[in-house]
Image (spheres, rainbow, N blue to C red):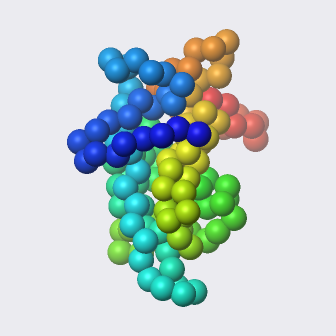
């Protein structure tokens, strides 16, 4: 979907469809590391808290969204979130693209093309509003 050169100090636009370098809303790229072997292999998302803070969403929601999209288990261990399996080797941008899908669905305002990421959730009469 999107090719990204992930240098440590680089910040990405929260809206993946924005190419403006002066776009106001930025986030760090996901930093992932694969640990373990065989059946115990897992992908640890090292900076999920920083990414979640930049999106004003809880880290648990981001990881749960990726876990559901990929159909794998998620785990919190020693304040580190991980997903079962290797999600970096075959496609290094797989998780970043899943994050962008979450942003499109659950962060950016969808009202008449607004696309502002300064949204909050509101649950009213058992319906989720943004």
On the question of residue 62 being in view, the answer is no
Q: Residue at point 34% right, 46% down? A: 6
Q: Is residue 72 left or right of residue 2?
A: right
Quadrant holding the N terminus: top right
On the question of residue 110 being in view, the answer is yes
Camera-side residue of 48 and 70: 70
x%, y% of residue 125?
A: 76, 36
Q: Residue furthest left?
A: 9
Q: Residue at point 61% right, 61% down? A: 67
Q: Is residue 17 above or below residue 100?
A: above
x%, y% of residue 96?
A: 50, 47
Camera-side residue of 59 and 7: 7
Q: Is residue 91 above or below residue 126?
A: below
Quadrant holding the C terminus: top right
Q: Is residue 55 above or below residue 115?
A: below
In which image quadrant can residue 110 be found? top right
Q: Residue at point 42% right, 46% down? A: 52
């Amino acid at each position: 979907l999107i090719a990204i050169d992930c240098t440590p100090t680089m910040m990405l636009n929260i809206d993946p469809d924005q190419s403006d370098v002066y776009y106001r809303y930025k986030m760090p790229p996901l930093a992932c590391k694969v640990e373990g072997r065989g059946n115990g292999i897992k992908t640890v998302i090292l900076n999920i808290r920083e990414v979640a803070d930049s999106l004003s969403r809880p880290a648990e929601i981001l990881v749960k969204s990726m876990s559901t999209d990929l159909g794998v288990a998620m785990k919190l261990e020693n304040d580190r979130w991980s997903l079962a399996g290797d999600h970096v080797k075959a496609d290094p941008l797989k998780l970043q693209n899943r994050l962008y899908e979450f942003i499109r669905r659950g962060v950016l305002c969808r009202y008449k093309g607004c696309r502002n990421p300064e949204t909050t959730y509101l649950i009213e009469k058992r319906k989720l509003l943004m």
